[in-house]
Image: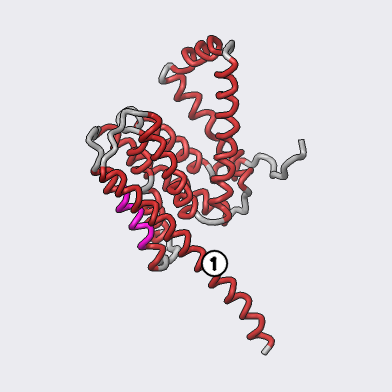
Amino acid sequence: MGYTKAKRLNMETAKKLFLVSLFYNANVAFALASLKGVNIPMYIAIKRLTPLAVLIAGFFRGKGRPSTQVTLSVVLIAAGVLIAALGDFSFDLYGYTMAFTSVFFQTMYLVLVERSGAEDGLSSIEIMFYNSFLSLPFLLFLIIATGEFPNSLALLIAKSNSLSFLVILVLSLVMGIVLNYTMFLCTIVNSALTTTIVGVLKGVGSTTLGFFVLGGVKVHGLNVTGLVINTAGGIWYSYAKYQQKMHKSSKLASDPEAHRK
């Protein structure tokens, strides 16, 4: 329709992004599976280990060692997660295993998205398009194999007379599109680590709501302590990255002046 600028479908590009789509869908599948045994606050707490995993993956990819402040802030975030998890008295091995596996796959696809955007010059819209295109066969197989396809279709038809259901369904679809677009955009413009840290700060609100709105979760001192430590780590990281950006800007500004002299 001409509202966006994107290259035509290219099979070579699709092959390069196949792993991105594979890890993305694996992350979603294991994340949903983990929610059968882990409550929302603890699920979010475990997912906050992703920044540490991204930091380690970036180091092994040769991105160089991050600054001391960035490293310590991410470690502080991870420490907050572990402390919060110690207050979870409804420990479920299956749920925790699924959640940790989801962390691995999320780390892999974020790192691959960052590399794809930087090396292949793909925009956020193009990556989202290829990811959706490549996800269709996998998701179709999944819903047919699990028996969701006929059951979910019948349920959708039965619920179609409910205006509130249709409004919530449409809002969920739109928010999902916006979430994916902004996530890919943030990863390309900034870095995979920054995207996960933003997710950590977002998760603070989700965790708080999970404690008091969803119910079924016992508030423990360790949970609150871990949440505070986790938030402090996120703020520290943001401050450290801001300092790095200001330092680079001042250095770039001083280089032309030195050249003129």
Residue 138 versus residue 75 in the image, above or below: above
Locate the N terminus by quadrant. Answer: top right
Q: For residue 261, what is the image quadrant?
A: bottom right
Residue 249 versus residue 104 in the image, above or below: below
Residue furthest right in the image: 2
The reply to whether the magenta stretch includes residue 76 is: yes
Residue 197 pos. (x, y %): 45, 52
| Mark 1: amino acid | Lys
Mark 1 Cα within 10 Å, few/some/many (few <14, many 20+)?
A: few
Q: For residue 235, what is the image quadrant?
A: bottom left
Protein image colouring: secondary structure
Residue that mark 1 sits on: 245
What is the span of residues highlighted in magenta in the rendered image? 72-81
Query: Which residue is more in the foreground, 66 or 201?
Result: 201
The reply to whether the magenta stretch includes residue 66 is: no
The residue located at (45%, 18%) in the rendering is 148
